[in-house]
Amino acid sequence: MTQQGILIVLSGPSGTGKGTICQELLRSYPNLHYSISATTRPPRAGEINGVNYWFTSKDEFQRMIHDDDLLEWAEVYGNYYGTPCRYVKELLDSGRDVVLEIDTQGAMQVRGKFPQGVFVYIVPPSLEELAKRIHKRGTDTEESIKRRLSCATLEMNQVYSYNYVVVNDEVSNAVHKIEAIITAEKCNVLRNGHLIQQICKINPKE
Ligand code: ADP
Ligand code: 5GP
């Protein structure tokens, strides 16, 4: 029997480096797949439909909610974001690990439906550094930056609902920590019942 893959949920304030970390993780960890979210937010310069997001209209998003096509969804900074569930389910059932990069409202919905997921909260080393990163990214308007920063402290109080917290000081440090978390979770007794049974079958006298 194929062991179900691990669902890793990454959250953290906008600009903390989730996307950057995800890209590095996906490069170094071939069994990991990225769940492309649907959003009603317009694409930023350089973003590609079907790569960064599925860019959808509000009507299409409402249809997905109505048809129960989303594992979770939320309104974030005035736009809708959601995780199409079919792809995630297919990947997990075939033993592949999946990473979701979603906000805290969505993460809590996933935790309700999928408590065996691994919930990781990424924090910046400081709020000053967070502000610098959002400005450096250069993709948001001043108004959007203000909105994202004013939400950051409130958002960070949600960290206690997660299993792990990772400080994104250096991208490589943060990626190594998340790899270590995945490795530890793969060894979790609760995920290895089938393995123990197999070993016991091979050595029936023990
Ligand atoms: P998020 O996905 O959390 O909104 P991004 O991955 O878009 O954040 O990162 C925001 C900005 O911060 C980008 O310009 C990125 O290059 C930069 N960044 C990410 N991680 C670090 C880091 N550890 N040190 C310095 N800059 C970083
Ligand atoms: P951005 O507009 O910067 O790409 O994303 C804004 C916020 O939306 C981030 O906190 C990001 O994690 C969150 N987000 C992205 N995709 C999803 C999703 O599918 N569901 C939820 N709930 N949040 C998402």
Image (cartoon, rainbow, N blue to C red):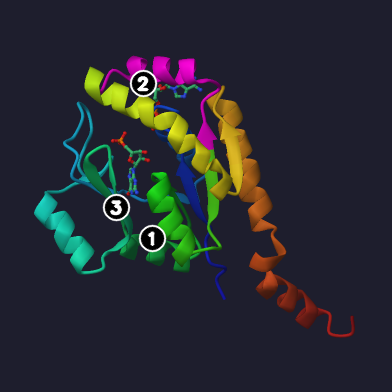
Image x and y of residue 168, in percent? 54, 27
Among numbered discs 3 and 1, the one appearing first in the sequence:
3
- Quadrant, the C terminus: bottom right
3D distance between C-alphas at marks 1 and 2: 29 Å
Task: Check residue 148 in the rendering and tell me which mark sits there, or answer none.
Answer: none
Q: Nearer the viewer, residue 34 or 124?
A: 124
- The location of residue 13, given as percent across then percent down, is 42, 33
Where does label 3 land, which residue?
82
Q: Which residue is tagged 2?
A: 134
Q: Helix or strand or loop: what does disc 3 sit on?
A: strand
The residue that disc 1 covers is 88
- Of the pair 170 and 114, the residue shown nearer to us: 114
> Is the shortest distance between ligand 1 and the CB of mark 2 under 8 Å?
yes
Q: Is residue 183 above or below residue 203?
A: above
What residue range appears in magenta? 122-140
Q: Residues within 10 Å of mark 2 (few under 14, many from 20)?
A: many
Q: Who's the residue at 34% across and 28% down the image? A: 148
Say whether residue 59 is left or right of residue 138. Answer: left
Q: Is mark 3 within 8 Å of ligand 2?
A: yes
The amino acid type of the residue labelled 1 equals Val
Nearest to the eye among marks 3 and 1: give it: 3
Q: Secondary structure at mark 2?
A: helix
Q: Nearer the viewer, residue 135 or 177?
A: 135
- The outermost residue toward the bottom is 205
Q: Residue at x 44, y 21 (%)?
A: 130
Q: Residue at x 42, y 62 (%)?
A: 91
